[in-house]
Image (cartoon, rainbow, N blue to C red):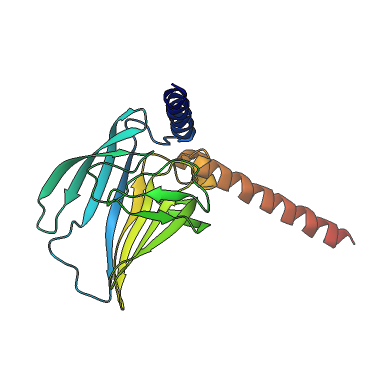
């Protein structure tokens, strides 16, 4: 009887801890958010079987499960569409890579990967992605002969860049456009536009002021 009671208490405590851990996980994206990645290759010939760009659009969020519509544009112009689902809390799903992690992840956090492995966030860095300065968390994973590097946006958890390096060759997908955040606006773009007539009026007024000022200075000079 005592052993049964102890088992029940242990099970309840485990479930409470599990629920608490899941409650702390924040999903930083919402339905309708999208982000686009562009292929970048250095030190090798771009593989023809890799998409030139990939667009990830969030189609649903249910608890910690996030679903994305992935559009992949190939070099021949063809486009392939897939549906990826990933659990932000456990890292499980059918995604090819870790498209999103918990929002506000920090240095020292362990991220479970869809490949059943895990990585530890090693630092926070600031960089420019999709036209804006973003704080991102960084992690890397060593393979047999290659190095995988992940950069996730700290605020939202969305992937900013994934790269694979082998020797001097590197292949990466880097975020270059999104609706999740907006690039800073140009102050000049907020100035009201002036018509040609208004510009002509301003120019004429300034010219008249210059002529009058010159005449006054000349008159004062003659009198002296």
Asked if residue 202 lies left or right of residue 68, the reply is right
Q: Residue at x 63, y 48 (%)?
A: 206
Percent coordinates x, y for residue 125 in the rendering: 52, 57
Asked if residue 175 lies left or right of residue 69, the reply is right
Q: Residue at x 44, y 27 (%)?
A: 3
Percent coordinates x, y for residue 151 in the rendering: 41, 55
**Position above or below: 126 against 4:** below
Percent coordinates x, y for residue 118 in the rendering: 37, 53
**Position above or below: 4 against 95:** above
Image quadrant holding the N terminus, namely: top left
**Position above or below: 148 against 13:** below
**Residue that sits furthest to the front in the current view:** 1
Asked if residue 108 lies left or right of residue 141, the reply is right
**Position above or below: 196 against 148:** above
**Residue that sits furthest to the right in the current view:** 224
Q: For the image shown, how many numbered marks are present on the structure?
A: 0
Asked if residue 149 lies left or right of residue 20, the reply is left
Image quadrant holding the C terminus, namely: bottom right
In this view, the residue in front, 35 or 217, is: 35
Percent coordinates x, y for residue 148 in the rendering: 33, 63
In this view, the residue in front, 149 or 125, is: 149
Q: Residue at x 32, y 62 (%)?
A: 163
In this view, the residue in front, 91 or 213, is: 91
């Amino acid at each position: 009887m005592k052993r049964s009671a102890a088992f029940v208490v242990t099970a309840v405590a485990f479930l409470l801890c599990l629920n608490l851990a899941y409650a702390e996980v924040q999903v930083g994206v919402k339905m309708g958010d999208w982000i686009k990645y562009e292929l970048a290759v250095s030190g090798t010939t771009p593989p023809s079987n890799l998409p030139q760009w990939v667009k990830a659009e969030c189609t649903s969020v249910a608890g910690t499960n996030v679903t994305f519509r992935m559009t992949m544009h190939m070099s021949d112009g063809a486009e392939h569409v897939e549906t990826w689902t990933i659990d932000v809390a456990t890292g499980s799903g059918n995604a090819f890579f870790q498209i999103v992690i918990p929002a506000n992840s920090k240095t020292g956090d362990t991220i479970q990967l869809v490949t059943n492995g895990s990585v530890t966030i090693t630092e926070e860095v600031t960089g420019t992605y999709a036209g804006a300065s973003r704080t991102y968390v960084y992690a890397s994973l060593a393979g047999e002969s290659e190095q995988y590097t992940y950069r996730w946006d700290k605020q939202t958890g969305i992937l900013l860049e994934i790269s694979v390096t082998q020797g001097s060759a590197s292949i990466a997908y880097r975020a270059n456009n999104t609706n999740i955040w907006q690039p800073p606006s140009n102050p000049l773009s907020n100035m009201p536009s002036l018509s040609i007539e208004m510009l002509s009026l301003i120019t004429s007024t300034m010219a008249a002021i210059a002529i009058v000022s010159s005449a006054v200075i000349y008159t004062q000079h003659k009198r002296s």
